[in-house]
Image: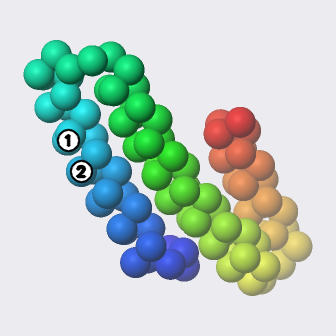
């Protein structure tokens, strides 16, 4: 992976910590809207991590593809990933 590994790991570890907190909130039967807010915050972190990864794919894997066929394949992978996200 050519994405900024430090950034991606920081985002994922923060999201993991938030998920642990959300689980505790559910177990403690906390207020629904507070739980939802934390889920939304965690989702945003995961989206940022994914954006870093997809940006690296575009800037490195697609740009440095060794052939037009490989480049087309990398673009198709990116389009498929975006289709799942959107």
Determine which quarter of the picture holds residue 83: top right
Q: Which mark is residue 17?
A: 2
Q: Is residue 82 left or right of residue 19?
A: right
Direction right: furthest residue: 68
Q: For label 1, count other residues whose C-alpha is less than 10 Å away and answer few (under 14), some (14-19) or many (20+).
A: few
Count of numbered marks: 2
Q: Image point 32% across, 26% down: which residue?
A: 35
* Residue 86 vs residue 40, the one in the foreground: 40
For the C terminus, give its image quadrant: top right
Determine which quarter of the picture holds residue 12: bottom left
* Residue 27 vs residue 8, the one in the foreground: 27
* Residue 4 vs residue 77, the one in the foreground: 4
Residue 24 screen position, x and y as percent: 14, 31
| Mark 1, residue position | 20
Q: For label 2, count other residues whose C-alpha is less than 10 Å away and answer few (under 14), some (14-19) or many (20+).
A: few
Q: Image point 21% across, 40% down: which residue?
A: 21
- Say what secondary structure mark 1 lies in: helix
Q: Is residue 60 above or below residue 54?
A: below
């Amino acid at each position: 992976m050519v994405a900024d590994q430090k950034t991606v790991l920081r985002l994922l570890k923060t999201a993991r910590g938030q998920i642990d907190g959300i689980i505790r909130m559910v177990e403690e039967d906390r207020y629904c809207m507070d739980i939802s807010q934390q889920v939304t915050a965690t989702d945003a972190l995961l989206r940022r991590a994914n954006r870093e990864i997809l940006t690296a794919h575009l800037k490195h894997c697609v740009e440095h593809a060794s052939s037009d066929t490989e480049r087309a394949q990398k673009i198709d992978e990116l389009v498929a990933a975006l289709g799942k996200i959107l």
